[in-house]
Amino acid sequence: MSGIISYSGIATKTRAMRGKLLAREDYASLAELKSVADAVTYLRQHTAYGGLLKEVTESRLHRGVVEELLLRSLYEDFNKIYYFCNLKQRRVLELYFCKYEIQMLKSKLRSIFNPVDEEELAAEIREFQGYSGIDREKLVEASSIPELTEALKRTPYYDVFRQLAQGGEKALFDYEMALDLFYFSNIWSKKEKLLKGKERAMFTKVYGSQIDMLNMMWIYRAKNYYQIPPAGIFTLVIPISYRLKKDQVIRMASAENEKQLYAAVQETYYGRRYKELKERDLELLYRQSVRDIYHGEKRRNPYSMTAVTAYLFDKEQEIDQITTLLECIRYGVEPGETLKYIL
């Protein structure tokens, strides 16, 4: 009963917001369009993104601008939910919001390692309303890793950058992995303090599964794209285990080829549950597994924080799918092939 009382307003709010997400028919209609301009017009006229996309003129129709506006929609939705929450619920949401701050920091890092149009990124940063005390103007002005590190003083991210700097010169990959490691380690350690009983169990299942799946995906990428040896792979793995056991991680990291890696994956809980997936589908396995867990917990416990996190996850996925769809249209991918990437 207490859950219904505490979460009835949030559950009603997220249900209404969920009704504005794109339907499969929207994706099918978008995939048939021949230009990005036509797709943006469709989004403007037939979806909840119309208010934001009315700002986009044809001369500004490129990925950076559209993606910035789509992300703004996500942040606006987050803030709408945040103001419906009580103090305890807000603490949990602020912990969740850390992932968006990290995405923004990764964008800034990429602009330092691979200089791009700073004007667009600066606009995105200034629009961003965070909860950890990041000085947005200092972040905009930072043009090097030392300057970025200095801009993050008095935030949870400062020690991440400072410790990396002590180990000599690092690549973009090192910073991105360190931020991901910080995010999941931080959220995992604080769940004991913020949550109790059934809510803690739900949180553990959702994030434990994500951590397991990300570790599997990172091992796959480290071996197949970067040829990192086993000893190096172990430093990348998030040191948290839910259903993925230590000996299974060792077998995956030590696999001598992709066939052995896939065989090791099949021995895990996730490999056994999703047997129909092919060898190269670990990223699909991650998305499908996390989506199934979020939606399953939301159905079983509709009056809980899962109603919020499941909605935010679906909104994030929608933005990724729209971005992918626009790129497919830009490069003339056939509609049927485009839908394989996003549905």
Image (tube, rainbow, N blue to C red):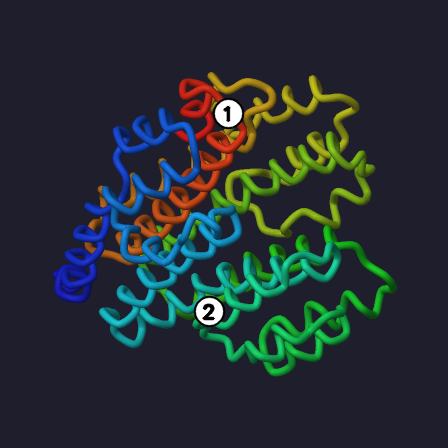
Q: CA distance from mark 1 to mark 2?
A: 33 Å
Identity, as a three-letter code, of the amino acid under mark 2: Phe
The image quadrant where one finds the C terminus is: top left
Task: Give whichever of 247, 2 is nearer the camera.
Answer: 2
Q: Residue furthest front?
A: 59
Q: Give the vertical position of 225 relative to 192 (above or below).
A: above
User: Which residue is rendered at x = 43% and y = 38% of the image?
Assistant: 36
Q: Residue furthest right?
A: 168
Q: Which mark is residue 128?
A: 2
- Left or right, 193 with respect to 27, comes to right
- Left or right, 188 with respect to 253, comes to left
The image quadrant where one finds the N terminus is: bottom left
User: Which residue is rendered at x = 32% and y = 42% of the image?
Assistant: 41
Q: Which residue is mark 1?
A: 332
Q: Which mark is residue 256?
A: none
Local secondary structure at mark 1:
loop
Q: Residue 267's x, y, as percent? A: 58, 24
Task: Give whichever of 118, 214 is nearer the camera.
Answer: 118
Local packing at callout 1 (Cα closer than 10 Å; few below 14, some 14-19, many 20+) is: some
Q: Residue 157's x, y, as percent? A: 62, 71
Local packing at callout 2 (Cα closer than 10 Å; few below 14, some 14-19, many 20+) is: some
User: Which residue is rendered at x = 67% and y = 47% of the image?
Assistant: 237
